[in-house]
Image: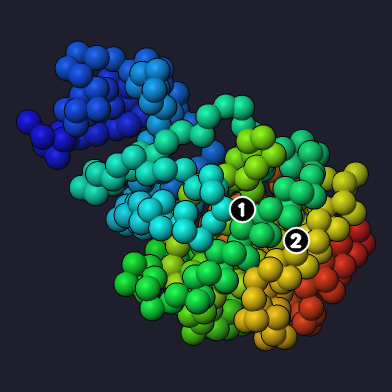
């Protein structure tokens, strides 16, 4: 029997996973997993941590077709292959140790395994929500993204055959974030549909599509970057909007740290621009980064994937402020940050 003949496979079931790894040859016949833990936090994959023996600790992911959110949201599990490719190629665009090592890909099962990040480490999103905001972490966050964008923009011909497919980004981000929010919020329908059209016209650099604190682990004050299944060649300004949204939404959610998070968002943009390269210095790019920030701020309170830490009142407040900003968006990122915070304070 081969691993491909083992159906079905549910990696969250310890017995099923153990049998699968035995047939693959990762475990000897009859050898159990030493330790096993289901990891939470993601909506698009089943993810577990497994210790096979003293030398091997892996994180194993199995792609879901139906995502774990409140509304129906389907997409092909073939996207796991994008993540496998990303784990193979991103190390050449990022500082050493930023990307975990790929152990194997089982394409027919939509499964990948990567080397687990050794303890001690913390999830950056949880650190930020607990009020632990360190500007050096923000600086690294900006530097990693800038190097990724700059380096890939210089070798687009090389990356095009690997990451030219944008279908997963379109279904998991453009439709699920901007398109769904446009349907739910008629006041900003035109803004968001125009932003979708504009985004589809851009092919400037590799674009991650999921660059957020949730996908960052902090180990010994160094950032480790996870989850790459919507990586594609597109508009890198989307990554700025997506990531800045998390800093601004936490500024909204944590009033006692509002000014600190707003300052961190401005610092993040300034650090990114300084390191990214010429294409990020244009007024057109900054204006698109502003529009993507507004689009993502709206999507996280009206799209398919809502920020789970927001109260209903916070969702209504952010929606109201963003509707006003979309009616007359600023051209500069720092102006957007200031106006967003002013609006949140006004309605608080």
Q: Residue at x 70, y 81 (%)?
A: 281
In percent of width and height, residue 13 lies at 32, 25
Q: Is residue 316 left or right of residue 183?
A: right
Q: Residue at x 90, y 44 (%)?
A: 256
- Residue 186 is tagged as none
Disc tally is: 2
Q: Is residue 8 left or right of residue 260?
A: left
In percent of width and height, residue 32 lies at 28, 15
Measured in 3D between alpha carbons, the distance from the residue under mark 1 to the one under mark 2, in whole angstroms, is 13 Å
Identify the element where label 2 is drawn: helix
Residue under label 1: 212
| On-image quarter of the C terminus | bottom right
Residue under label 2: 268
Is residue 185 positioned above or below 12 on the image?
Answer: below
Q: Quadrant of residue 2?
A: top left
Identify the element where label 1 is drawn: loop
Q: Sort mark 1 into few (<14), some (14-19) or many (20+) by Cα contacts within 10 Å.
A: many
Q: Quadrant of residue 344?
A: bottom right
Q: Is residue 74 visible?
A: no
């Amino acid at each position: 029997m081969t691993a491909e003949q083992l159906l079905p496979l549910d990696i969250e079931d310890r017995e099923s996973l153990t049998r699968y790894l035995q047939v693959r040859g990762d475990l000897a016949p009859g050898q159990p997993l030493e330790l096993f833990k289901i990891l939470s936090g993601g909506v698009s994959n089943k993810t577990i941590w497994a210790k096979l023996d003293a030398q091997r600790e892996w994180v194993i992911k199995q792609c879901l077709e139906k995502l774990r959110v409140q509304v129906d949201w389907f997409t092909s599990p073939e996207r796991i292959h994008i993540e496998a490719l990303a784990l193979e190629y991103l190390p050449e665009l990022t500082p050493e140790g930023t990307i975990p090592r790929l152990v194997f890909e089982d394409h027919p099962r939509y499964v990948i395994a990567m080397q687990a990040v050794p303890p001690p480490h913390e999830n950056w999103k949880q650190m930020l929500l607990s009020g632990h905001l360190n500007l050096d972490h923000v600086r690294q966050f900006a530097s990693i993204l800038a190097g990724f964008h700059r380096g890939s923009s210089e070798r687009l011909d090389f990356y095009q055959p690997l990451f030219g497919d944008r279908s997963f980004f379109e279904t998991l981000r453009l439709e699920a974030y901007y398109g769904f929010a446009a349907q739910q919020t008629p006041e900003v329908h035109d803004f968001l549909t125009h932003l979708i059209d504009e985004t589809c016209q851009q092919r400037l650099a590799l674009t991650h599509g999921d660059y957020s604190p949730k996908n960052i682990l902090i180990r010994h004050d160094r950032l480790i970057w996870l989850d790459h299944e919507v990586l594609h060649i597109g508009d890198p300004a989307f990554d700025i909007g997506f990531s800045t949204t998390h800093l601004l939404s936490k500024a909204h959610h944590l009033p006692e740290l509002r000014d600190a998070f707003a300052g961190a968002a401005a610092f993040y943009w300034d650090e990114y621009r300084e390191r990214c390269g010429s294409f990020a210095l244009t007024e057109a790019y900054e204006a698109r980064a502003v529009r993507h920030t507004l689009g993502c701020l709206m999507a996280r309170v009206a799209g398919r994937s809502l920020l789970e830490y927001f109260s209903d009142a916070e969702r209504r407040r952010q929606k109201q402020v963003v509707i006003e900003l979309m009616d007359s968006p600023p051209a500069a990122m720092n102006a957007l940050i200031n106006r967003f915070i002013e609006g949140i304070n006004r309605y608080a």
